[in-house]
Image: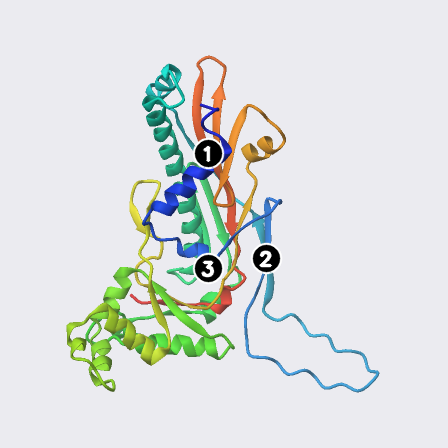
């Protein structure tokens, strides 16, 4: 298997699969681009963007008055390690061993099974990464934090330990303002108010991110169609409550583009869960908000040091996929995927979260 499962061959397989796949890209890759670092620690600085404070006047040759770095704090912590694998099926091992040529169909089928199972591990690693990024981007309770609770591990990474985000960048709606109160809700007004708050700090929000359930609630608001019907040159199509018209109403009245992100993942207990939680809308500016930082896993480190017993391939910047062959009894052959990663969130205070219901 090690002759077929090489670092280059698996990477090429992943690239080819992605080129021919219709799978939508992960939002987090655009907002938190992937970078590699050597350290297992992560440190970044968050700064609350605010209106400029005028410089203090001073006389020539006088001591310079030094300003406190208001609203700036250092966030640091150790990056979490994720690892999982699967045993290679004995039927695949037998087909590989009995293949009489490198072009044998049995050999191709066996390697296809191994590659597909390996890709599932990579997809699982990327789902973990995206879940972390969306946990801090769209906090339903207003506190950007990452919670990891599985396999006996219980870790919390709180990106807002002083509560500044929940106090200044979070709007929980209530009563008749809830987007589920379709007769009285006014999503356009809520989004406009949130955008104005950011603009008061010198931040220009251009998009609002939500999942399909939240967007459906927005579409059901009677006020949305009041805006549509009363707008200059209103189309008859406004009466049909189409998604395109709802997005146009929001764009024309707030300047925000609605981005419906409805990708989901299966949690450790098998529950299908959207990356962006229900009833959350997040205003964001153009550009990136942070980085997805990866460190080298133990398998990757050993392979880089010349360990010939491991065949390791690196895909998606920091996901290490390793073929492991144990010569002890019983003989074990398995594929292991691992990653050490954590997103930074330097642009945290340039976003605004609305709890819509």
Tell which circle, 3 or 1, labels the residue nearer the N-terminal end: 1
Residue occupying the point 35% across, 74% down: 191
Residue occupying the point 49% across, 74% down: 203
Left or right side of 196 for 261:
left
Q: Would you say the residues marked 2 and 3 are in contact, meaning their CB atoms lie under 8 Å apart?
A: no
Residue occupying the point 35% across, 26% down: 108
Q: Return the x and y of residue 45 as percentages of the image width and height.
A: 59, 61
- Residue 221, numbered label: none
Tell me the residue that label 1 is attached to.
Answer: 9
Labels 1, 2: front one = 1
Instruction: Locate the N terminus and report the quarter of the image it occupies.
Output: top left
- Residue 44, numbered label: 2
Left or right side of 352 for 214:
left
Tell me the residue that label 3 is attached to.
Answer: 31
Q: Would you say the residues marked 1 and 2 are in contact, meaning their CB atoms lie under 8 Å apart?
A: no
Q: CA distance from mark 2 to mark 3?
A: 16 Å
* Residue 81 seen in the figure: no
Left or right side of 144 for 73:
right
Q: CA distance from mark 3 to mark 1?
A: 29 Å
Tell which circle, 1 or 2, labels the residue nearer the N-terminal end: 1
Query: Vertical placement of 34 versus 105: above or below?
Result: below
Q: Nearer the viewer, residue 341 or 236?
A: 236
Tell which circle, 2 or 3, labels the residue nearer the N-terminal end: 3
Secondary structure under badge 3?
Answer: helix
Secondary structure under badge 1?
Answer: helix
Q: Would you say the residues marked 3 and 1 are in contact, meaning their CB atoms lie under 8 Å apart?
A: no
Instruction: Locate the C terminus and report the quarter of the image it occupies.
Output: bottom left
Q: Return the x and y of residue 122 as percentages of the image width and height.
A: 42, 40
Q: CA distance from mark 1 to mark 2?
A: 36 Å
Labels 3, 1: front one = 1
Residue furthest to the top = 329
């Amino acid at each position: 298997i090690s002759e077929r499962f090489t670092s280059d061959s698996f990477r090429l397989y992943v690239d080819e699969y992605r080129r021919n796949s219709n799978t939508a890209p992960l939002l987090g890759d655009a907002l938190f681009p992937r970078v590699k670092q050597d350290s297992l620690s992560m440190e970044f600085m968050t700064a609350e963007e605010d209106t400029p404070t005028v410089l203090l006047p001073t006389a020539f040759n006088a001591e310079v008055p030094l300003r406190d770095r208001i609203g700036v704090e250092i966030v640091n912590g150790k990056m979490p390690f994720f690892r999982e694998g699967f045993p290679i099926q004995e039927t695949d091992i037998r087909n590989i061993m009995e293949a009489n040529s490198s072009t044998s169909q049995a050999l191709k089928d066996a390697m296809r099974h191994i590659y597909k199972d390996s890709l599932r591990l990579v997809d699982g690693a990327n789902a973990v990464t995206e879940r972390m990024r969306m946990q801090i981007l769209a906090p339903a309770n207003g506190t950007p934090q990452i919670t990891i609770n599985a396999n006996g591990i219980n870790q919390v990474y709180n990106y807002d330990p002083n509560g500044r985000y929940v106090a200044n960048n979070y709007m929980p709606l209530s009563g008749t303002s809830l987007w589920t109160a379709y007769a009285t809700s006014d999503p356009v007004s809520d989004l406009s108010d949130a955008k104005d708050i950011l603009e008061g700090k010198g931040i220009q929000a251009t998009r609002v991110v939500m999942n399909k359930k939240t967007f459906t609630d927005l579409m059901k608001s009677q006020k949305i169609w009041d805006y549509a019907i009363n707008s200059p040159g209103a189309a008859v199509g406004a009466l049909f409550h189409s998604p395109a018209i709802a997005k146009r109403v929001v764009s024309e009245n707030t300047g925000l583009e609605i981005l419906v992100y409805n990708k989901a993942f299966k949690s450790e207990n098998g529950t299908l869960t959207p990356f962006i939680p229900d009833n959350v809308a997040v205003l964001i500016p153009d550009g990136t908000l942070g980085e997805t930082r990866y460190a080298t896993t133990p398998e990757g480190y050993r392979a880089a040091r010349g360990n010939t017993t491991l065949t390791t391939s690196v895909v998606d910047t920091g996901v290490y996929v390793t073929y492991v062959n144990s010569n002890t009894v019983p003989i074990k052959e398995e594929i292991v995927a691992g990653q050490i990663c954590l997103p930074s969130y330097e642009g945290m205070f340039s976003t605004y979260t609305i709890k819509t219901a």
